[in-house]
Amino acid sequence: MNELISKRWSPRAFHAEATISDDELRVLLEAARWAPSHGNSQPARFVVGKRGTPTFDAIFETLRPGNKTWAFRASVLLIGCVITQDSRGDLPNVEFGLGLAMENIALQAVDLGLIAHMMGGFDKTAAHTAFNMPDDVRPLVVMALGHQGDLEDLPEDLQAREQRERQRHPLSDTTFTGTWGQSLFG
């Protein structure tokens, strides 16, 4: 397996004074732009705020309280959105396209020595309103980007979560053949 995949994780300890350059941000968003999508619909759209800007602050305000305890230290917050229609009409499987774009950002972040953490814990209606999004746009995920910080900067409960061993379901529980539940790998 590619090392970028095995090294990717979702840390919360961001360095509060480190920044992401415009060039790095452009590379991250270019990685998203090149993600596959259903019928090449390219439904992913992003609202991006660097720390210290009104956009960052507005994104931060949409976060659930638990995410606010650490996300303020991120260098960048972005909202991953989808457009649900284009000139062809309603777009199918837009979540698939955004998911791949977000993963491309996360993997590119690893390659650049950065960290990324995706969050579903935010107020989608508030985000839609705050950024005056059109009706055919749906905000689906927030991502924090930045540099690894000190574990000690996190609340104690999050310090423990940061140090837990990463676990994934075995392939025998997730990959089937012939019939559902019959493992491909025994």
Image (spheres, rainbow, N blue to C red):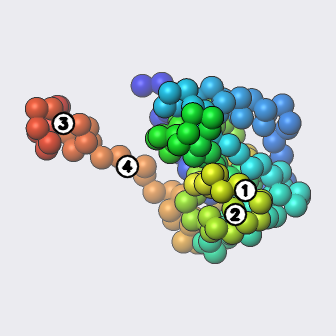
Crowding near the residue tagged with mark 1, few <14, some 14–19, many ≥20 C-alpha atoms within 10 Å: some
Q: Are marks 3 and 1 in contact (CB under 8 Å)?
A: no
Residue 81 place in picture, x, y as percent: 63, 49
Q: Residue at x 55, y 26 (%)?
A: 40
Name the kind of residue labelled 3 in the image: Phe
Which circle marks residue 127 in the picture? 2
Q: Mark 3 vs mark 1: which is more N-terminal?
A: 1
User: Which mark lies nearer to you, 2 or 4?
Assistant: 2
Q: Is the N terminus in the top left, top right, bottom left or bottom right quadrant?
A: top left
- Outermost residue, right side: 53
Residue 149 place in picture, x, y as percent: 71, 53
Report if residue 27 is visible in the image. Answer: yes
Left or right of 109, for residue 131: right
Q: Secondary structure at mark 3?
A: strand
Name the kind of residue labelled 4 in the image: Gln
Q: Are marks 2 and 1 in contact (CB under 8 Å)?
A: yes
Left or right of 185, for residue 57: right
- Identify the residue under disc 3: 176
User: Which mark lies nearer to you, 2 or 3?
Assistant: 2
- Identify the residue under disc 4: 167
Name the kind of residue labelled 1 in the image: Met
- Identify the residue under disc 1: 133
Q: CA distance from mark 1 to mark 4?
A: 37 Å
